Image (cartoon, rainbow, N blue to C red):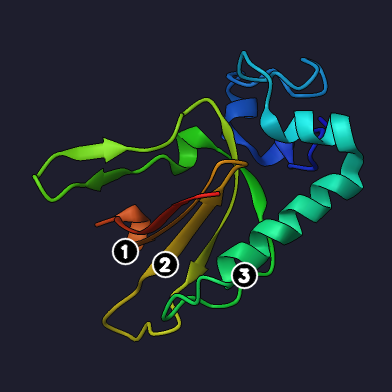
């Protein structure tokens, strides 16, 4: 199946278990409402989409977070896979994302990892915010590093 944004639907578990009906087949609404990425491509074309991706990459790199390597690429990611529960100072946990929306993001290993400590940075964005979090193996102990409105 071909997607509007270039995501590989054949590798996605949502496609495989029929939760996703495909963005080309649903005119950019694979999860019931218009995907912002598909809408962006429809309005401005693929070049415009590549331009916003580069802008977001530059914004992430300009944050200069200790241990975070230079970001080279962002990928379309479904909220269900990246919507982690973050602990708040009062002991509660909160999810910041919508499980049924798409985001642009990536996962990169912390430059300061050694044999004893393995950490990753998860980065996510849409038109409204940038999110950088840090977590251990399999998403353990997530911590918000930066949540920034755009």
Which residue is situated farthest in the left direction here?
A: 90
Disc 2 and disc 3 in contact, CB within 8 angstroms: no
Residue at the spot x=27%, y=46% of the render?
Answer: 86
Q: In this rendering, would 70 be left or right of 112?
A: right
The residue carrying mark 2 is 120
The residue carrying mark 1 is 136
Q: In this rendering, would 44 be left or right of 39?
A: right
Q: Quote the CA–CA distance across marks 1 and 3.
A: 19 Å
Indicate which disc, 1 or 3, sits on the residue closer to the N terminus: 3
Q: Secondary structure under badge 2?
A: strand
Q: Provide residue 7's location: percent of width, then percent of height.
A: 74, 42
Q: Is residue 25 above or below residue 42?
A: above
Disc 1 and disc 3 in contact, CB within 8 angstroms: no
Disc 1 and disc 2 in contact, CB within 8 angstroms: yes
Q: Provide residue 15's location: percent of width, then percent of height.
A: 65, 27
Indicate which disc, 2 or 3, sits on the residue closer to the N terminus: 3
Q: Quote the CA–CA distance across marks 2 and 3.
A: 13 Å
Which one is nearer the viewer's eye here, 110 or 17? 110
| Picture quarter with the N terminus | top right
Residue at the spot x=89%, y=44% of the render?
Answer: 46
Which one is nearer the viewer's eye here, 147 or 91? 147
Residue at the spot x=52%, y=68% of the render?
Answer: 108
Q: Is residue 52 above or below residue 17?
A: below
The image quarter in which residue 73 lies = bottom right
Q: Secondary structure under badge 1?
A: loop
Q: Provide residue 5's location: percent of width, then percent of height.
A: 79, 39
The residue carrying mark 3 is 71
Q: Quote the CA–CA distance across marks 1 and 2.
A: 6 Å
Front: mark 2 or 3: 3
């Amino acid at each position: 199946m071909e997607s509007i944004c270039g995501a590989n639907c054949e590798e996605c578990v949502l496609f495989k278990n029929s939760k996703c009906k495909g963005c080309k087949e649903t005119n950019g609404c694979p999860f019931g409402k218009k995907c912002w990425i598909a809408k962006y491509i429809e309005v401005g074309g693929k070049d415009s989409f590549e331009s916003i991706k580069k802008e977001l990459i530059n914004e992430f790199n300009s944050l200069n977070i200790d241990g975070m390597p230079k970001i080279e690429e962002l990928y379309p990611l479904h909220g269900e896979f990246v919507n982690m529960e973050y602990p708040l100072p009062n002991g509660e946990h909160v999810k910041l994302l919508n499980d049924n929306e798409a985001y642009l993001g990536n996962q990169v290993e912390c430059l300061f990892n050694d044999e004893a400590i393995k950490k990753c940075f998860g980065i996510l964005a849409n038109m409204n915010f940038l999110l950088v979090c840090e977590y251990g193996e399999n998403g353990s102990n997530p911590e918000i590093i930066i949540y920034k409105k755009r």
